[in-house]
Amino acid sequence: MSLVLKRILLISLLCLSISGLAVYSYYHSDGNDVSMYMNIRDQSDDYDRLFDNYNFKTFTISFEEVIFDEMITNMDNHFEEYGDYVDNTMYPVDITYSDSYDSFTIYEVGFRTKSTTSRNVLRTIDYRGREVYHQTTFQLQFNETFYYEDNTNMKTILKTREVFNLEQLNFEYSQLYDGDYDEAMISETFTHYLYSEADILVANSSYGIVYLKIGEDIVNYGFFSYIETIDSEFLKNNFKSDLGGNYGDLYKVTDTQTVGDLELDFDGYIGIDTDNIRYTYSLRNNTLDGERRTHSSLTTFIEKINDLEYFKENYEDLIDYDRFARYLAISFLVGNTDDLRYNFNNYYLYFDVYDDLVTFIPFDLDNTLGFGKHLNAYSGYGTIYSIYFNLDNPSPLIESFFSVDELSELYESYILEFIDDFFNFNTFSDLYLSAKSLYETILTSELHLGNNTFDLRNTEWYFNTKISNVLAEIQ
């Protein structure tokens, strides 16, 4: 080797060493080994396995005892002051995820309880002084930070951390209504699957077992659905940004203050949620650090859909009408009575960054397939009401939609197509039997909280009756 080549090689090695030291210094300069908090796994593979319904999965969520006790105290104090447990404080936990193929741990993840109707305090003391644990819906925040100053390496790394290619993940237990569990257990995840098969933009969902580790004690916490969060990552994965990387406005619509019916009386119901205020039309992005006060995309949309003649002439420029027709069709088939059509609830509106065209995104799909609240509100567990709208005062968007013959016909065609292609009991039964074989033995042998035995309840009757009645009305 020539002297020149040797010098080039030595200089290259020196540069690599300096670079390596710089990287090491960056990850350790705060006095912490940041590398243990990073996630350098192949997250695409992790995402696929997380939402593979035929893959056995568990989460173990580890609390320090003092942190868990603080959470219980804060939730109890909130109940004493407000009459509910809707305390959104975030707490640090470590999580260990395991499935049929792999296992890994992520440190310092944010944990908070969520929801209103399905939120419980996690531990109470009974009349004999014994600790009693309760299931609750909750959320893991993978990019939360707790202990670090701004502009430090630790905070910079953690604020951009993702797990499963997600910033957040939601957990929902098998719901109780009127004292009864949904013993089919997989209804919500299967409904997500049906919406996806209908080509609706919807969060991904799967399920598995959750354990709580509090200090050294293990609580067998039960069977949960794991549900992707509709957030900035969801927008990146499903929509195009403008040249500056910006996305349009995303609003979450619930019946928090009043029903989300898209009527003109929206004043005071649109805003950015705070610890003390939750809006019916809640802006989830582009908030200008909470200072945003204008909502022209949403208010203009509401005004235009309330003008029936304008809607008839311009619906193609207002909403992704094809996906909305698909949404109405599959929502009717699954018997979702907690949606825009019947309860004016549980959907997102996304406004395209260029032309404000609205995409409708449903969520909270646990009141379906013959189970949930409003079971008999529209007769026969959702099997025998008309395929059109049945309310005296429907949402103006629903009323305007069905006033257009072409849209009504499109909706009917999708109902028939979905029945032919994938809406049937056999598809449900295959997934149900797989979940039962994967989880029931462990749930029962370990005496997990909540429902731990699987049962088909009225699902076969629901599918067959729903299909029969729909076909009879259309024909």
Image: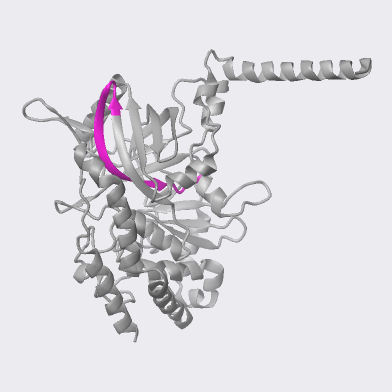
Q: Give how far across and how far down residue 69 sits, in percent.
A: 26, 23
Examine the residues drawn in magenta and state their main secondary structure: strand
Q: Give how far across and how far down residue 397 sits, in percent.
A: 41, 69
Which quarter of the rendered picture does the C terminus lie within?
bottom left
Q: Is residue 48 above or below residue 266?
A: above
Q: Total number of numbered labels?
A: 0
Q: Residue furthest left?
A: 128
Q: Residue furthest front?
A: 1
Q: Is residue 306 visible?
A: no
In this rendering, would 293 be left or right of 330?
right
Q: Is residue 286 visible?
A: yes
Q: Residue furthest bottom?
A: 475
Q: Is residue 372 above or below residue 48?
A: below
For the point 28% across and 69% down, which residue is it?
A: 463
Q: Give how far across and how far down residue 254 sits, in percent.
A: 35, 53
In this rendering, would 383 be left or right of 474?
left
Of 155 and 134, the residue lying toward us = 134
Which quarter of the rendered picture does the N terminus lie within?
top right
Verify whether residue 221 appears in magenta: yes
Verify whether residue 245 appears in magenta: no
| Magenta highlight range | 213-232
In this rendering, would 36 be left or right of 344?
right
Q: Give how far across and how far down residue 253 sits, in percent.
A: 39, 54
For the point 23% across and 58% down, which residue is it?
A: 372
